[in-house]
Amino acid sequence: MLLEQLREVIEGGHKALVFSQFTSLLRIVRNHLDADGVAYEYLDGATRDRQAHVEHFQNDADCRLFLISLKAGGLGLNLTAAEYVILLDPWWNPAVEAQAVDRAHRIGQTRQVFAYRLIARDTVEEKVLELQKTKRDLAAAIISADNSLIRNLRREDLELLLS
């Protein structure tokens, strides 16, 4: 599904950021892109001269994809050339995912940005998404003005929110 989506991005003349917390998964994606002769940039914690990779992606019209490990790409990157952000696996902390998407939502972005999460059914990642949703819903209810859930909040709900 990812490779098909990336083909559509490239054929449409767009650019995409592809994030994963697993460099081994990014390596699999790289192998497919290399086999197909697709130009891309890559960034993980071992990458040196990050700015050169960023500038190449930002300025080279033929470089349409940027594969980034979630941790390495969380801070200090301005990638406004991208119109698509694809998250290959959820991070336990939704704020980290939001930071990844924000790499494309920067000052100077003139286009609409689309963010996608690719999650396989019946996996740990699917359960992580469910946990994120539960935590978000609980936090929103506690912060909301009507306080209706606060009265109904159980100890288990509070423990889940704080875990």
Image (cartoon, rainbow, N blue to C red):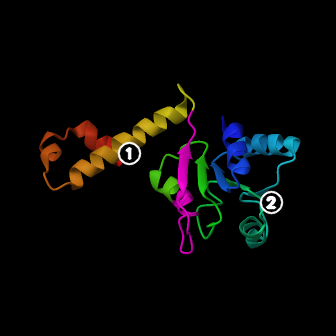
Inspect the magenta stretch and tell me whether residue 100 lies in it: yes
Q: How much space separates mark 1 and mark 2, taking CA atoms?
A: 44 Å
Task: Categorize mark 2 by other alpha carbons within 10 Å: few (<14), some (14-19), many (20+).
Answer: some
In this view, which residue lies farthest toward the top? Answer: 122
In this view, which residue lies farthest toward the front? Answer: 12
Task: Using the rendered view, name the quadrant where residue 34 is placed.
Answer: top right
Task: Categorize mark 1 by other alpha carbons within 10 Å: few (<14), some (14-19), many (20+).
Answer: few
Q: Which residues are magenta?
A: 99-119
The residue at the point 52 percent across, 53 percent down is 97
Q: Earlier in the sequence, mark 1 or mark 2?
A: 2
Quadrant for the C terminus in the image: top left
Please state which of residues 46 and 40 is positioned toward the viewer in this rendering: 40
Q: Is residue 62 left or right of residue 140?
A: right
Q: How many marks?
A: 2
Please provide percent x and percent y for residue 139: 29, 50
Quadrant for the N terminus in the image: top right
Please provide percent x and percent y for residue 79: 64, 66
Label 1 secondary element:
loop
Please state which of residues 13 and 41 is positioned toward the viewer in this rendering: 13
The residue at the point 71 percent across, 59 percent down is 45
Q: Is residue 88 left or right of residue 161?
A: right
Q: Which residue is mark 2?
A: 62
Q: Is residue 160 left or right of residue 53?
A: left
The residue at the point 19 percent across, 41 percent down is 153
Q: Which residue is mark 1?
A: 163
Please provide percent x and percent y for residue 14: 67, 56
